[in-house]
Amino acid sequence: MKIAFIGLGNMGGGMAANLAKAGHEVRAFDLSEEALARAVEAGCIAAKAANFAVHGADAVVTMLPAGKHVTQVYEESVFGTAEPGTLLLDCSTIDVETARINVANAASYDLVAVDAPVSGGIAAANAGTLTFMVGGTDEGFARAEPILAAMGKAVIHAGDAGAGQGAKICNNMLLGASMIATCETLALAQKLGLDPQKFFDIASVSSGQCWSLTSYAPLPGVGPVTPADNGYAGGFAAALMLKDLRLAMEAAASVDADVPMGSKARELYEAFVEADKDGRDFSAIIQTLQK
Ligand code: NAD
């Protein structure tokens, strides 16, 4: 299959490489020449501009920073360039409203679009083990699934247009709030004189168990190896968590949902990201709670 891939950054680079490895003809484009050169090394074909990649492609994958970038690429390089019937898969994390508008606008050009954001970081993008949550029609999902399966371990149809983005930001709001709860709990346990590994052993098999504790323990030397054991480098940058929490708050406001824990998590990550100059993993927020 001929696939245009636009946005070859931390995530898109590995994803495009996995599509090429699966035997697809991947026409890649990024504004960054370094990113484009890396994609060529990984088996993709460099396009001079996004519309060159899109022309004649069976499918167009985008992996861009935010909604405004996706809309710009769609309006300038996809709509009017892609053949009718072409499948558009936007894997970026963007706001639900923009995702729905993009899908509707694509339909007016006879294009089939799905929102397909991912869970899993750079390592999962490189390894081809992402989880995709897909919003769109049954037809869109059926066509998207085999393409996404070449980049991930799970592909789930979340519902209609925008449902993929809805699932993504709900999941990450839960993750942000549960990470902070895990961090403040570990800090309290330490202040109460408990050995943190002992507390980890207890809570991991008790009712306080959660992914942030058991799989992503935010203290070095406690539980499995996590970014905490690497000076909080790598992993999922706190700035990206803040981006997702802001999207969650926007979505909550649009449907008048009450999200006090998500709102507090957003507030705490805002303060953390502003003060942290090293772009550390989101679990490093524990250091602000240990003081
Ligand atoms: P990134 O900044 O590393 O990559 C984005 C790429 O898009 C850059 O290479 C940039 O040059 C390119 N770009 C921007 N505008 C463009 C345009 N108009 N045309 C062509 N290329 C353009 O970001 P990332 O970490 O790869 O994240 C991409 C998306 O995935 C974001 O929406 C992010 O929220 C989401 N996400 C990231 C992670 C993660 O761990 N990094 C995890 C899950 C989801």
Image (cartoon, grey):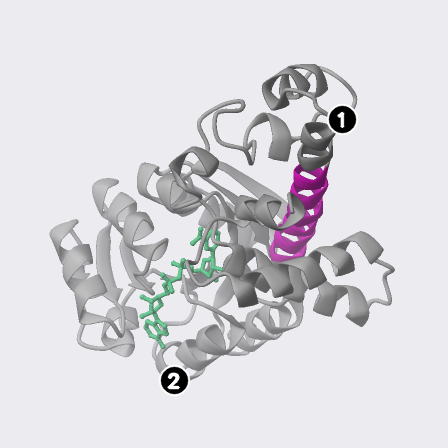
Magenta portion: prevailing SS class: helix
Q: Is residue 271 left or right of residue 35?
A: right
Is residue 217 inside the magenta stretch? no
Is residue 168 inside the magenta stretch? yes
Q: Say what amino acid the circle numbered 1 marks.
A: Gly
Q: Is residue 31 left or right of residue 134?
A: left
Look at the image and give the residue range highlighted in magenta: 160-184
Near-viewer residue (21 or 202)? 202
Q: Residues within 10 Å of mark 2 (few under 14, many from 20)?
A: few
Residue identified by numbered label 1: 208
Near-viewer residue (269 or 176)? 269
Q: Say what amino acid the circle numbered 2 marks.
A: Glu
Residue 76: assigned label: 2
Task: Assign a secondary structure to mark 1.
Answer: loop
Name the mark nearer the viewer: 2 or 1.
Answer: 1
Q: Earlier in the sequence, mark 2 or mark 1?
A: 2
Asked if residue 206 is positioned above or below residue 50 in the image, the reply reads: above
Q: Residue at x 65, y 66 (%)?
A: 246
Tell me if the residue at label 1 has its CB under 8 Å from ligand 1: no
